[in-house]
Image: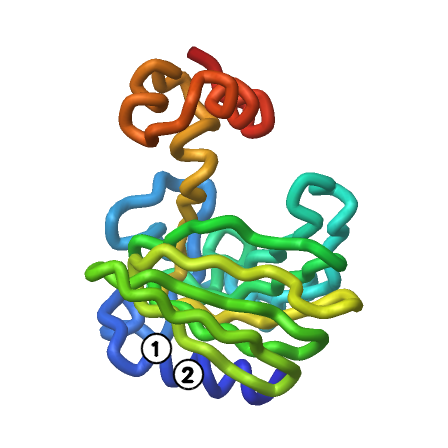
């Protein structure tokens, strides 16, 4: 965990934010979020507990039987103290056969460190070059900002990784959900993906899409 905190410090070294002019800006989540983050809550109400995140525990992969994966986020909505600091963290738990489908974080680079098991991690660059490696405990991989990437359990036991991200609100867009989890017309999906109607219908049913 000390090593993860060191990584987070490195990620924050070039951030520009409210923290550039004040020591910290613990988010006031009752206010609206803007492009620069949340307003600060009153410094008089800030305590040591604001700077501690106590829910970085193993996730329940059975809650997601399709992916057999759980992500525990420590971004601004869960951990308001990271507001304005340009950092956040997450914990990834993968059951045997579990995976995180192709997705991206538009506003953040990601460092992933394996703490248990073996996880295959890959990303695709903007010129469609593919970078894939199976990582074991103690290995780290960087995923550059905004690139499509994925993770899956490559071992015969559960796997866990800790993630550090260079944004307090990195967000995530899953490619499958973007294509099949909304009301985009099936005819358009078929034409733009070259999938046949039966495949599109199946995938929309899986990801909750309509149309």
Asked whether, in this view, residue 66 is left or right of residue 16, the answer is right
Asked if disc 1 and disc 2 are in contact, CB closer than 8 Å, the reply is yes
| Residue 112 at x, y percent in the picture | 51, 73
Residue closer to the observer: 131 or 182 = 131
Asked whether residue 206 appears in the rendered view, the answer is: yes
Quadrant location, the C terminus = top left
| Residue 55 at x, y percent in the picture | 69, 61
Residue denoted by label 1:
12
Residue plotted at (39% across, 55% down): 169
Residue plotted at (74% across, 50% down): 61
Q: Secondary structure at mark 2?
A: helix
Residue closer to the observer: 153 or 15 = 153
Asked whether, in this view, residue 28 is left or right of residue 135, the answer is left
Residue denoted by label 2:
9
Asked whether, in this view, residue 46 is left or right of residue 36, the answer is right
Residue plotted at (45% across, 17% down): 197
Q: Quadrant for residue 78, please give it.
A: bottom right
Quadrant location, the N terminus = bottom right
Eyeballing the image, is 194 above or below 53?
A: above
Residue plotted at (36% across, 39% down): 32
Eyeballing the image, is 197 above or below 168?
A: above
């Amino acid at each position: 965990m000390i090593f993860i905190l060191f990584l987070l410090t490195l990620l924050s070294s070039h951030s520009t934010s409210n923290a550039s002019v004040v020591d910290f800006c613990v988010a006031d989540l009752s206010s609206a979020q803007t492009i620069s983050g949340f307003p600060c809550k009153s410094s008089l109400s800030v305590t040591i507990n604001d700077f501690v995140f106590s829910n970085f525990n193993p996730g329940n992969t059975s809650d997601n039987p399709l992916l057999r994966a759980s992500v525990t986020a420590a971004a601004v909505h869960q951990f308001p103290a990271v507001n304005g600091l340009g950092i956040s963290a997450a914990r990834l738990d993968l059951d045997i056969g579990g995976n995180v489908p192709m997705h991206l974080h538009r506003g953040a680079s990601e460092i992933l460190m394996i703490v248990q098991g073996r996880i295959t991690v890959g990303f695709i660059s903007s010129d469609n070059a593919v970078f894939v490696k199976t990582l074991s405990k103690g290995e780290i991989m960087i995923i550059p900002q905004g690139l499509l990437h994925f993770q899956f359990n490559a071992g015969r036991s559960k796997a866990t990784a800790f993630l550090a991200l260079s944004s307090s609100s990195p967000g995530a867009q899953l490619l499958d959900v973007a294509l099949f989890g909304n009301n985009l017309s099936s005819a358009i999906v078929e034409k733009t993906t070259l999938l046949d109607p039966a495949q599109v219908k199946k995938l929309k049913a899986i990801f909750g899409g309509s149309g």
